[in-house]
Image (cartoon, rainbow, N blue to C red):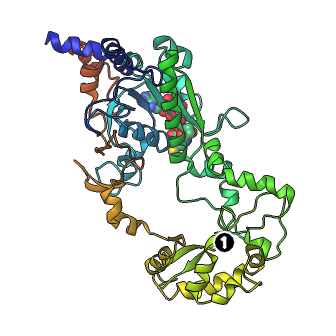
Amino acid sequence: MAKKQKKAKAKSKPAAKKIVKKLAAKKTSAKPAAKKTNGNAPRPSSKPYGKDGKALTGVRILDFTHVQSGPTCTQLLAWFGADVIKVERPGVGDITRGQLVDVKGADSLYFTMLNHNKRSITIDSKHPQGMRVLNALIKSCDVLVENFAPGALDRMGLTWEYIHKLNPRMIVASVKGFGPGPYEDCKVYENVAQCAGGSASTTGFRDGPPLVTGAQIGDSGTGLHLALGIVSALYQRIRTGRGQKVLCAMQDGVLNLSRVKLRDQQRLAHGPLTEYSQYGEGIPFGDATPRAGNDSGGGQPGRILKCKGAPQDPDAYIYFITQAPVWGPICDLIGEPTWKTDPEFATPRARLPKLNQIFARIEEWTMTMTKFEVMNACNAVDIPVGPILSMKELAEEKSLRDTGTVVEVDHPTRGKYLSVGNPIKMSDSITEVERSPLLGEHTDEILTKVLGFKAAEVAEIKNSGALSAPEKKEKAA
Ligand code: CAO
């Protein structure tokens, strides 16, 4: 028992600090390296690859995130080995647990697919005993990640100054809708960010309204950005010994992903955007980057073309690029070998005003085959094409299962379901996808094993009501 408590106490030190100390001890006892390599680099591990912990082993995260943007970030950190402790409001938890419910009584896929490999503790952060637990967590964690509405963390009393005083090594990472400026106090969801970050104005067809995309570039995209910021801050902390604030605004994240469209905005000052279909069609440009339909963003004309089965099959299409270096093989494949030398078609410049005619001819050819047959025929001669794969096809794709990009996960209340695993593969930090936690599943374990609270203290905290949902008041008769 005494041994156990000692262990628990030791654990309450910032987790990564312990690892750094261990490394330092190892370094002094080891023989000096013949030649200094990179700073304080330890000697290479002698363990087999994948058997010496994970990239973020020893990092502990106080995960105050909800919905999609923040959870995407902390899920990635968990996959890299961080101990992610998700703090949830008693009784309710992350709102997504109950959103888009498909299996009655079970956590939704919205929640389970964004919260793998985490532990859950319920804490009312506005209760004094809840704050007691949070203080202990702040002292024992390396990073606090949150994506509350602007000001919410401060209103809980968890200002940067407060957190930094309790734990000067703590990194405080936030997702907000907007950075400092006129909109900084606004709440923001995915599509708001797509619109405010320049994606929607540049997506869709010229003669139609702006469109949002199915890829969650506002939420998941910003979560990805935040994860990189956190890992960089952890790296800097090794040198400086102190934490810092990391902020990713969703507007900024979307704009970063729409970078090529700001490129085009500036090119407009020097003449029309010749790779946009509207140039070939003789339609003048306005003063802002227009919507480009399915034109390729890389300066090579591209379109989505029908294949056998379209349009009845909504996904029987292929993305086809008339890349200049493979123009010859394209002409041979579609049965127009004279286009290789005909001055009307032979150069990219000559082709620009005829793109509709050219793609109509290519489509005549693609419609004679399935999208996979087109892909095989094109790849055989190094023409890159993109079959439009449905979610059904992706879910059934064997190679994605083999690499762990699509994984089947078992869950105690919902049974087996598919999830997207870690898209980032590392050879020495192997991801094992574990199911998401039930609400408050690890409350006791975290209080005792991580924070070292004694049984009497746990009872006191629990009896105060700080970790449980308030009793429902009886309706007045
Ligand atoms: N105990 C007690 N209170 C808690 C709590 C806990 N464990 N967890 C959260 N709360 C409280 C917060 O303190 C806040 O209270 P106050 O407003 O009184 O200070 C309240 O719950 C609501 O938090 P919120 O404002 O963050 O949540 P919301 O549902 O109203 O807004 C969202 C959601 C996403 C619009 C907002 O959080 C936001 O703009 N976040 C930043 C941008 C972002 O990440 N958006 C992407 C979300 S994914 O599409």
| In the image, residue 197 above or below residue 174 | below
Beta carbon of the mark 1 residue lies under 8 A of ligand 1: no
Task: Determine crowd level at label 1: few under 14, some 14-19, many 20+ residues with C-alpha closer than 10 A.
Answer: few
391 on left or right of 455 = right
Residue 316: image x %, image y %? 48, 78
Question: Which quadrant holds the C terminus?
Answer: top left
Residue nearest the viewer, comparing 337 with 176: 337
Query: Where 404 sits versus 319, above or below?
Result: above
**How many numbered marks appear?**
1
Question: Badge 1 is on which residue?
Answer: 324
Q: Position of residue 285 (x, y in %)?
A: 83, 65
Quarter of the image holding residue 260? bottom right
For the residue pair 272 and 11, the one nearer the viewer reads as 272
Q: Nearer the viewer, residue 209 or 420?
A: 420
Expressed as whole percent of the image width and height from the top left, the position of residue 82 reads 36, 32
The answer, for residue 392, to whether it is visible in the render is yes
The three-letter code of the residue at mark 1 reads Ala
Which residue is found at the position 82% from the left and 58% from the top? 268
Give the x, y percent position of residue 9: 27, 12
Q: Secondary structure at mark 1?
A: helix
In the rendered view, does 257 fall on the left or right side of 207?
left
Vertical order, 250 against 191 (above or below):
above
